[in-house]
Amino acid sequence: MEEIIKASLPKSLTYFEYRKLVTDLLLEGKSTGPIQTDDLLHYSKLNETRMNRLEKTIVISPENTERINLLRRKYIWLVISEGWCGDAAQLLPIMHKMEVLSDNIDFKIVLRDENPALMDKFLTNGGRSIPKLIVLDKETLEVLADWGPRPKEAFDLIKNYKEKHGVIDEKIKTELQMWYLHDKGLSTQNELIELMRLLEIQE
């Protein structure tokens, strides 16, 4: 695992480098990743709009701001993502706003399809679901925890729909985006803060 992490980190991007990459590719009519389809390009365009909006509207709650400032250890938040991923578009702006509040979090993003060995260490029910947050000790690069691909309530929404209907279709994708809209990022904040709290008390 350590070798895979070490191989992936040099290819990682800051949040703003990731945003620029996605934007530049869109100007060329492309999405991230080796597979280019009209659907992936369409989703990437939607996500660009979503992320622009979320960067302006997402607010980290006062309680979570206070709690994130209590972190003592230094961490890397390494997130596996792609520009066409709807969940990533909803969650990365929240993670970015959280890391800005803490000197102890270094936020990095790697592309899923450029890092298959890393992705395959963090599968969800056997699938390459993203985004996936990997929490590393900044000094040792030890994997301390992982989280994703979405908050529990949103995860259950998708899981229950798939069990009932057998597919993930546009109807549930729209429902999921509405869930994110009404949640305003609070579930993600709370789950990540609790994850970090547990890591701090395990020290």
Image (cartoon, helix red, strand yellow):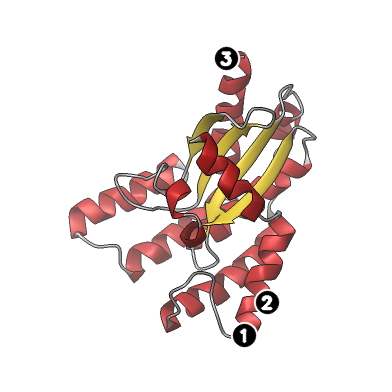
Report how far apart the C-alphas of labels 3 and 2 lie in the structure: 42 Å
- Kindly identify the amino acid type of the residue bearing the numbered disc 3: Gln
Q: What residue lies at 19% left-to-right and 54% top-to-bottom? A: 164
Is residue 60 something one can see in this rendering? no
Q: Quadrant of the C terminus?
A: top right
Report how far apart the C-alphas of labels 3 and 1 lie in the structure: 47 Å
Front position in the image: 98 or 11: 11
C-beta proximity under 8 Å, tags 1 and 2: yes
- Kindly identify the amino acid type of the residue bearing the numbered disc 2: Asp
Disc number for residue 24: 2
Q: Is residue 199 left or right of residue 123?
A: right
The image shows residue 81, relative to residue 107, as above or below, that is: below
Disc number for residue 202: 3
- Kindly identify the amino acid type of the residue bearing the numbered disc 1: Glu
The image shows residue 36, relative to residue 75, as above or below, that is: below
Residue 131 location (% of width, % of height): 50, 52
Residue 134 location (% of width, % of height): 54, 39
